[in-house]
Amino acid sequence: MRSDAVHQVLETELDDARRRRGGRPPRVLDVGGGSGVWAVPLASAGCSVTVVDPSPNALAMLQRRAVDAGVADQITPLQGDTDALAVLSPEGGADLVLAHGLLEVVDDVQAAVAALAAATAPGGAVSVLVANRYAAVLGWALAGRVAEALQLIQDADGRLDAASDTLQRRFDTDGLQQLLAGAGLSVELVQGQAVLSDLVPGSVLDNNPRAADAMAELERVAALRSPLRDIATRLHAIARRPA
């Protein structure tokens, strides 16, 4: 696991899950994480991970990564999507449910969040990582694409026209909190990921360890501080199912 704000929060959550389970491995459900970017490090950290993804190619990549990392026996790959969670994963069976890069692309976002909540054990948590509307607005404006920035800020779902946008929606802090609360989850944290680092030229950090270390610390501090949090490239939320 890396040391950015998202990974640190997940490490704390997994430590709490181990305590709740009397030292047994935390049960993680990674929905839409087929290539193993999150699943393999979590398995390496001692978790039992089930990955649900509709893409057979992504699941094949996951299996190769798991074998290379020596954690294939700790990862269960299943082909499907949020509509199939009730069949593929037992209700209330996961201590931690990941939905990273998922809610931007599903057709029915309310139904997807309800399925994530149902798959979470009482007292467990859902970790959501989503694209931030205002970061996209800022990015397009800084690139001189003012018309696109205006469209993103005015559109109800924070997207460009359907023909040119690969995402179904983008989120802001308030909208994300309302969505999770609407599924009966208690939102405990909303923080940013890539708050400022995507705005800093790579040349500033290349071959300069002190600058890179300072950037990492700046990211950790800014992740929780509004309004900086609210312009992060991605928003990360932890929402808990009542015990």
Image (cartoon, grey):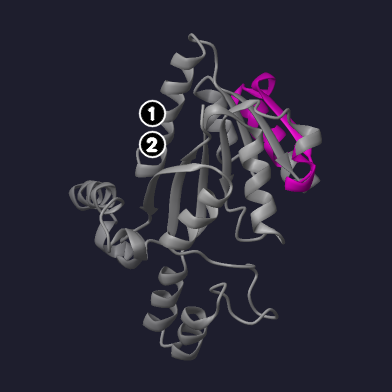
At 36% from the left edge and 35% from the top edge, which residue is drawn? Answer: 8
Up-down relation of residue 18 to residue 231 (above or below): above
Residue 61 percent across, percent down from the top left: 70, 41
Q: Position of residue 96 (x, y in %)?
A: 55, 31
Q: Amino acid at mark 2?
A: Val
Could you say which is closer to the camera, residue 69 or residue 154? 154
Q: Relative to residue 25, is residue 145 drawn left or right?
A: left
Q: Which residue is at the far bottom?
A: 147
Amino acid residing under circle 1: Thr
For the residue labelled by badge 1, is the local secondary structure a helix, a strand or a loop? Answer: helix
* Residue at 35% from the left image edge and 65% from the top image edge: 231
Q: Which residues are magenta?
A: 60-85
Identify the residue shown where x is 57% and y is 72%. 157
Tell me which residue sits at (43%, 29%) in the image. 13
Q: Is 167 colored magenta in this rendering?
A: no
Q: Which mark is residue 221?
A: none
- Mark 1 neighbour density, 10 Å: few (under 14) some (14–19) many (20 or more): few
Q: Residues within 10 Å of mark 2 (few under 14, many from 20)?
A: some
Q: Position of residue 70 (x, y in %)?
A: 61, 21
Q: Position of residue 103 (x, y in %)?
A: 61, 55
Residue denoted by label 1:
12
Give the prevailing secondary structure in the magenta stretch: helix
| Quadrant where the image shows the N terminus | top left
Nearest the viewer among 123 and 106 is 123
Task: Give 218 or 186, whichever is nearer the viewer.
Answer: 186
Res. 2 visible in picture = no
Q: How many marks?
A: 2
Disc 2 is placed on an element classified as helix
Judging by the rendered image, the residue that carries numbered circle 2 is 9
